[in-house]
Image (tube, rainbow, N blue to C red):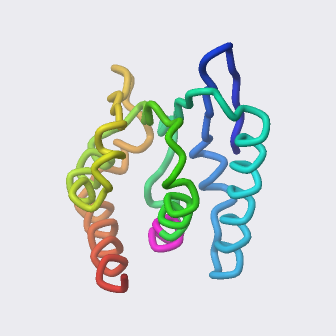
Amino acid sequence: MLTYKYDDTYLYIFFSMKQYIETQPRTSEACNEKIDYFKRVIDGIRTKFPEHRQIFVTDLEGVYLSEMYSVRYTIKILSDIHEYTKDDKQLDQIIIRNTGKVFNKVYKLVKSLLPKFIDELLVIEPEDTQKSRIDEEDNDDTFSFVEQELARCIHET
């Protein structure tokens, strides 16, 4: 799910959204296990690359938004990882590649909820000219589902 490469200055961390979707948590216990997994990876990165600047990259090509079992668990993971790493100052950029219409709509909804420093680090790279699977699902039902799930998660926090 996470791979990396590095040079003398930068550590490039690649997160496979496709693999995340395939192994996403379906229970609270599984969510906590996933958080623990990410924390172990982060600890390893801190140990092996203490001085490297970091660039985090994920690619949404071929990802169906409707395959996300629970937006709530994903938000919990992101929130806990943010809390765990908030004092780290090595992250230079977060790149999200191959974003489509659905992602852009969701991003507009959650942008104001993001910590300012994340918004400043975020680089959105729209999809290539090829139509991705995520846009094939760009319909009101998909967007409505995401909007409702986000509203519920925000209300519960």
Depth check, front residue: 83 or 71: 83
Residue 31 locus on image (x, y percent): 64, 72
Give the overall secondary structure of the magenta segment: helix
Q: Is residue 12 magenta?
A: no
Residue 54 locus on image (x, y percent): 56, 31
* Horizontal relation, residue 44 to residue 105: left or right: right
The residue that appears at 64% across and 69% down in the rendered structure is 25
The quadrant of the picture occupied by the N terminus is: top right
Residue 58 locus on image (x, y percent): 52, 37
Furthest residue in direction top, as rendered: 8
Depth check, front residue: 93 or 69: 93
The residue that appears at 69% across and 59% down in the rendered structure is 23
Place residue 92 in its image quadrant.
top left
* Horizontal relation, residue 107 to residue 55: left or right: left
* Horizontal relation, residue 86 to residue 40: left or right: left
Place residue 22 in its image quadrant.
bottom right
- Figure disc tally: 0
Magenta range is 69-75
The quadrant of the picture occupied by the C terminus is: bottom left
Q: Is residue 104 above or below residue 9?
A: below
Q: Is residue 71 magenta?
A: yes
Residue 19 locus on image (x, y percent): 66, 48
